Image (cartoon, grey):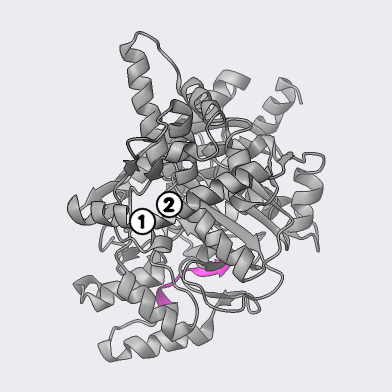
């Protein structure tokens, strides 16, 4: 498509906008009606550990969104010489889970408690037993019940409880809704009724009835919507919040806001049964769309849904590339000190490729990438840690591969339960996220960890902002009876099969050897948590 063609699409108001609030970056992607990215913007931000709670200030969410959208407008102007006055559809995505409660006047009651917190252990354990359904610590219902167990004063005043993208969507449209996939990270979903599980809601209401709160659970939860549903219109006030330049018109339709799990499924065309995807960035999670229900409850496995409500088994790990990124940054500082300026892409590419020269046992090195707690291995807090013996082969290649293995180690432990114990079948896993940007590295190591073919498409780096833009497009494009699976397969991904890597038996054996040492060495990490106080 020519520049003139794209300019015409933008001027006609036919472009679609996707926005994702990631862990370290807010990203906007503008697409044409065929789903091709045509412009983007980005804004870096970071969570804070305040009083033992991982949080983001919602004021930073707004300033970051406005800066990010402004950069997208600048990109559009630079490439096509036009502004953006109207859009065909908008969608918002963000990190799943967490806890943002509001009172009846719309006042935020406590700071945003993010998915990264591991402070709800007693609540999660009790609710898992009550529901006979795994309730992870980061789920909104676990945060709510933990606040109740803690006797927190604000709970009685709650009139609305939502997640980050649910909050943004509410402020821009006035609608208290979520996509069903994100709703599944707040409270369990019944995939038959395509709504919160009413039996579990009744159990929860009965559990807290003695407290005498002036609300019932369903009263304070967002309404769940399906992919393709109309989720409201951008209000005049919302348009000013999003676009401080004042160009953007109100009245634009928004699709249901979805979490990064759902947008990851869409961005990798992994919404059909026996498909799976892995998102690897600050955190890492794998999702497999199931053919049938699992045999038993596993605390390591979450049950969520696709954006159309199909059951999905999810292995979620709080930690992935943060420690790896910190080491790459350190090497970058060394390069600068030596008078060698290297951009981030060169640094990551060089170091990642070096990892592929490592010994099969990675020299006997060991690393734990725990910036925060990790429920799969039973840690409420984390301490990044590197260990070696005096006779370890301490080379750059072994060092880098060790940290790449560490980034996927807890995912491997969780996926082994799903694939080996539950016998879940998956034909192929599609990867997306920053880990896969260096060709031939992250993809190969992921294939070794999963012992499953891994495909990465050219769009792997686009991530959730692109995924939610596609969901916005589905809302306005879908024909009668056209499923999301059909829309993605036939209109978006037709002829765009990514390069697939088969697991190398030697790499599989190498990763398995590392996992044995990693599991045996977990007491080292435990000692670090207990000995090094925050």
**Which quadrant of the structure image shows residue 60?**
top left
Residue in front for this viewpoint, 226 or 8: 226
Magenta highlight on residue 224? yes
Residue depicted at 46% across the width and 64% down the height: 176
For label 1, count other residues whose C-alpha is less than 10 Å away and answer few (under 14), some (14-19) or many (20+).
some
Residue 211, image x and y in percent?
26, 87
Residue 313, image x and y in percent?
59, 65
Residue 459, image x and y in percent?
65, 37
Which mark, by number, is residue 411? none
Look at the picture and state if 485 lies above or below 144: above
For label 2, count other residues whose C-alpha is less than 10 Å away and answer few (under 14), some (14-19) or many (20+).
many
Mark 2 to mark 1: distance in Å? 6 Å
Residue 3, image x and y in percent?
70, 21
Q: Is residue 92 left or right of 153 when viewed as pictured?
A: right
Image quarter in which the N terminus is found: top right
Look at the picture and state if 301 lies above or below 170: below
Residue depicted at 70% across the width and 32% down the height: 9
Residue depicted at 48% across the width and 65% down the height: 185
Magenta highlight on residue 1? no
Residue span colored magenta: 219-225
Marks 2 and 1 in Cβ contact (< 8 Å): yes
Q: Secondary structure at mark 1?
A: helix
Q: Is residue 307 left or right of 282 when viewed as pictured?
A: right
Residue in front for this viewpoint, 124 or 453: 453
Look at the picture and state if 179 lies above or below 20: below
Q: Residue furthest front?
A: 391
Q: Secondary structure at mark 2?
A: helix
Q: Which residue is mark 2?
A: 518
Which mark, by number, is residue 522? 1
Q: Is residue 430 left or right of 24 when viewed as pictured?
A: right
| Residue 101 visible in image | yes
């Amino acid at each position: 498509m020519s520049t003139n063609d794209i300019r015409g699409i933008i001027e006609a108001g036919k472009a679609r906008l996707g926005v994702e609030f990631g862990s370290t970056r807010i990203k906007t992607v503008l697409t044409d009606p065929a789903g091709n990215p045509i412009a983007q913007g980005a804004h870096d931000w970071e969570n804070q550990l305040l009083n033992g709670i991982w949080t983001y200030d919602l004021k930073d969410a707004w300033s970051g969104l406005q800066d990010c959208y402004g950069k997208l407008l600048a990109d559009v102007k630079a490439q096509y010489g036009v502004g953006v006055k109207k859009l065909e559809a908008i969608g918002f995505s963000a990190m799943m889970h967490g806890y943002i409660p509001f009172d009846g006047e719309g006042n935020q009651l406590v700071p945003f408690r993010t998915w990264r917190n591991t402070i709800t252990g007693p609540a999660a354990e009790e609710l898992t037993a009550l529901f006979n359904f795994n309730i992870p610590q980061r789920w909104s219902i676990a945060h709510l019940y933990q606040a109740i167990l803690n006797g927190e004063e604000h709970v009685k005043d709650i009139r609305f409880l939502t997640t980050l993208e649910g909050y943004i969507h509410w402020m821009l449209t006035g609608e208290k809704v979520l996509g069903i996939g994100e709703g599944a990270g707040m409270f369990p979903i019944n995939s038959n009724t395509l709504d919160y599980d009413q039996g579990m809601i009744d159990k929860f209401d009965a559990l807290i009835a003695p407290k005498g709160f002036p609300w019932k659970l369903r009263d304070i939860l967002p309404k769940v919507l399906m992919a393709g549903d109309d989720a409201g219109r951008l209000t005049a006030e919302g348009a000013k919040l999003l676009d401080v330049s004042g160009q953007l018109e109100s009245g634009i339709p928004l699709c249901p806001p979805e979490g990064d799990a759902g947008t990851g499924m869409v961005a990798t065309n992994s919404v059909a049964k026996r498909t799976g995807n892995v998102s690897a960035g600050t955190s890492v999670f794998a999702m497999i769309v199931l053919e049938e229900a699992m045999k038993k409850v596993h605390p390591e496995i979450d049950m969520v849904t696709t954006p159309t409500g199909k059951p999905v088994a999810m292995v979620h790990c709080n930690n992935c590339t943060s420690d790896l990124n910190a080491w790459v940054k350190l090497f970058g500082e060394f390069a600068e000190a030596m008078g060698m300026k290297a951009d981030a892409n060169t640094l990551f590419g060089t170091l990642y490729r070096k990892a592929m020269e490592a010994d099969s046992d990675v020299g006997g090195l060991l690393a734990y990438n725990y910036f925060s707690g990790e429920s799969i291995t039973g840690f409420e807090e984390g301490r990044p840690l590197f260990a070696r013996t005096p006779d370890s082969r301490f080379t750059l290649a072994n060092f880098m591969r060790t940290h790449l293995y560490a980034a996927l180690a807890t995912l491997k432990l969780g996926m082994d339960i799903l694939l080996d114990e539950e016998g879940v079948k998956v034909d192929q896993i599609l990867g997306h996220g920053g880990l896969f940007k260096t060709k031939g590295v992250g993809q190969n190591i992921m294939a070794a960890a999963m012992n499953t073919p891994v495909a990465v498409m050219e769009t792997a780096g686009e991530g959730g902002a692109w995924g939610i833009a596609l969901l916005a497009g589905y809302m306005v494009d879908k024909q009668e009876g056209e499923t999301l699976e059909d829309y993605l397969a036939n209109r978006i991904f037709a002829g765009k099969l990514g390069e697939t890597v088969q697991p190398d038996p030697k790499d599989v054996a190498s990763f398995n050897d590392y996992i044995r040492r990693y599991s045996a060495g977990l007491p080292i990490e435990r000692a670090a948590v207990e000995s090094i106080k925050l």
